[in-house]
Image (tube, rainbow, N blue to C red):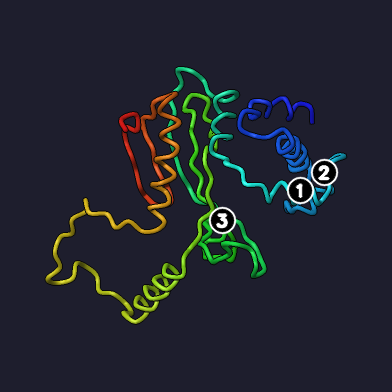
């Protein structure tokens, strides 16, 4: 517990003291507990002062996590002179029920099929020399009703076409690949990337940035 408090002491300029103490208790519980992480499970593994009501109050507190991740990275993880890359990827966590915010069917590479759960997109800084990754920004992926309808329409259209003939269709023309269709997902990633670059480029240049799940690459990130 004391070691964790010392580690997150750098966050005091952006995090109130009460919230900081609650975070320390929750971090201690999550590092020691087994099984699925839930609020009830966390409160059972916390020390004195980590009641279920306290855990609820913490998760109801609005926290700007990007500055906190950045402060922690600058104080404990940044190595001057090292080469850094910016990378993004989406993670899916299975979840049952119907009431959880953002609950939907997302493709999981682990299961190899769409599963019911929650999706989160993370941007991380990769230290090339240490071969380590440090998450900087995380956002939940929320699919709108319009996106769901479009996905169903595409799936239905694909089924109605049946087996597609090999080769290029007769009369088809070359497409302008410089014209990118900005979907809601790409707009979210673009917004996250801009926020991260505003912080990172003030400290260290980035030689390469990529988003693996979307295939969106941005080379020479040191030139905004």
Q: What residue does disc 1 label?
A: 55
Q: Position of residue 23 (x, y in %)?
A: 72, 39
Determine whether 221 is above or below 60 in the image: above
Q: Quadrant of residue 8?
A: top right
2 or 3: tag closer to the N-terminus: 2
Q: Residues within 10 Å of mark 1 (few under 14, many from 20)?
A: many
Q: Which numbered disc, 2 or 1, marks the residue that appears first in the sequence? A: 2
State yes or no: discs 2 and 1 in contact (Cβ < 8 Å). yes
On screen, residue 26 versus residue 109, left or right, reads right
Residue at 75% x, 35% y is: 21
> Which class describes the residues within 10 Å of circle 3: few (<14), some (14-19), or many (20+)?
many
Q: Residue 50: which disc?
A: 2
Name the residue beneath numbered marker 3: 92
The mark closer to the camera, 3 or 1, is 1
Q: Quick one: which residue is furthest to the top in this view?
A: 81
- Count of numbered circles in the view: 3
Q: Secondary structure at mark 3?
A: strand
Quarter location, residue 163: bottom left
Tag nearer the camera, 2 or 3? 2
Q: Position of residue 195 (x, y in %)?
A: 43, 39
Please state which of residues 147 and 126 is positioned toward the viewer in this rendering. 147
Q: Secondary structure at mark 2?
A: loop
Residue 19: x and y, percent? Answer: 71, 38
Q: Quadrant of residue 77?
A: top right
Quadrant (top left/top right/bottom left/bottom right) for the N terminus: top right
Left or right side of 80 for 98: right
Circle number at residue 122: none
In 3D space, how far apart are the residues under numbered discs 2 and 3 (Cα atoms)? 28 Å
**Relative height, residue 40 to residue 78 (above, below):** below
**C-alpha gap between disc 3 and disc 1:** 24 Å
For residue 162, side relative to residue 169 (left or right): right
């Amino acid at each position: 517990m004391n070691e964790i408090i010392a580690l997150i002491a750098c966050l005091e300029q952006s995090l109130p003291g009460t919230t900081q103490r609650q975070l320390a208790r929750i971090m201690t519980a999550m590092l020691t507990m087994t099984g699925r992480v839930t609020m009830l499970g966390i409160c059972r593994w916390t020390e004195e002062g980590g009641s279920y009501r306290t855990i609820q109050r913490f998760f109801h507190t609005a926290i700007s996590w990007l500055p906190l991740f950045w402060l922690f990275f600058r104080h404990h993880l940044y190595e001057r002179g090292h080469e850094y890359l910016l990378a993004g990827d989406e993670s899916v966590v299975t979840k049952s029920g119907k009431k959880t915010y953002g609950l939907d069917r997302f493709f999981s590479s682990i299961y190899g099929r769409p599963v019911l759960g929650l999706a989160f997109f993370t941007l991380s800084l990769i230290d090339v020399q240490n071969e380590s990754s440090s998450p900087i920004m995380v956002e939940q992926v929320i699919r709108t009703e319009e996106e769901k309808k479009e996905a169903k329409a595409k799936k239905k259209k694909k089924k109605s076409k049946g087996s597609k003939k090999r080769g290029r269709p007769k009369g088809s023309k070359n497409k302008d690949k410089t014209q990118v269709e900005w979907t809601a997902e790409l707009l979210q990633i673009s917004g996250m990337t801009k926020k991260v670059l505003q912080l990172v480029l003030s400290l260290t240049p980035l030689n390469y940035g990529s988003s693996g799940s979307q295939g969106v690459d941005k080379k020479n990130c040191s030139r905004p």
